[in-house]
Amino acid sequence: MKSNVVCLFIGVVLCNRNLTAEKVLVRLGDWNLETKTEPIPYQEIEVAELLVHPGYSGDPYHYHDMVALVLKQPAVLGATVNTICLPVNDQDYLPDKCIVSGWGKKNFKSKRFERVSQCQHEDVRA
């Protein structure tokens, strides 16, 4: 099954204010950044367009630091790449939990990013 062409990334606008679609390559389904061999091959897809949130002010410590990436071709859905449902505006999710995943830092003082994708349950915060 193929998915249409939008990926949402939060917290990336501040990384490079001169970011253009031509400079971005999306890698989907990658799990271990230390190896090129994965149990299930990853996908690399070029980006057609960057859609920065209209409320983004340039301040990385405030809201709307997010960008939607319109991919040049659909991703192939499978065990390591899939879609998510986004909530509607008027729905309150407090005090629910959510699942977060990625290669971020385990604490703010650390200078080291994880090399293997992490996943954990976190409280939803307002």
Image (cartoon, rainbow, N blue to C red):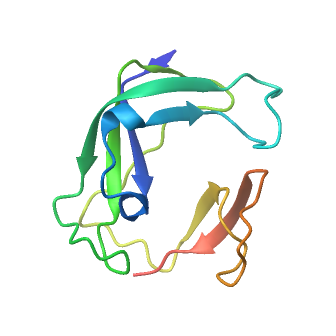
Judging depth in this view, the residue of 90 and 32 nearest the camera is: 32
Residue located at (23% from left, 57% from top): 53
Relative height, residue 40 to residue 1 (above, below): below
The quarter holding residue 74 reads top left
Residue furthest to the bottom in view is 109
Q: Is residue 107 left or right of residue 26?
A: right
Residue located at (74% from left, 41% from top): 31
Judging depth in this view, the residue of 103 and 15 nearest the camera is: 15
Residue furthest to the front in view is 18
Q: Is residue 53 left or right of residue 66?
A: left
Judging depth in this view, the residue of 41 and 99 nearest the camera is: 41
Residue furthest to the top in view is 1
Relative height, residue 62 to residue 70 (above, below): below
Q: Is residue 99 left or right of residue 33?
A: left
Residue located at (61% from left, 60% from top): 99
Q: Position of residue 67 (x, y in %)?
A: 33, 52
Q: Is residue 51 left or right of residue 106?
A: left
Residue located at (42% from left, 45% from top): 85
Q: Position of residue 126 (x, y in %)?
A: 39, 81
Residue 88 visible in the snapshot: yes
Judging depth in this view, the residue of 57 and 78 nearest the camera is: 57
Relative height, residue 36 to residue 124 (above, below): above
Q: Position of residue 101 (x, y in %)?
A: 64, 56
The quarter holding residue 89 reads bottom left
Q: Position of residue 21 (x, y in %)?
A: 32, 36
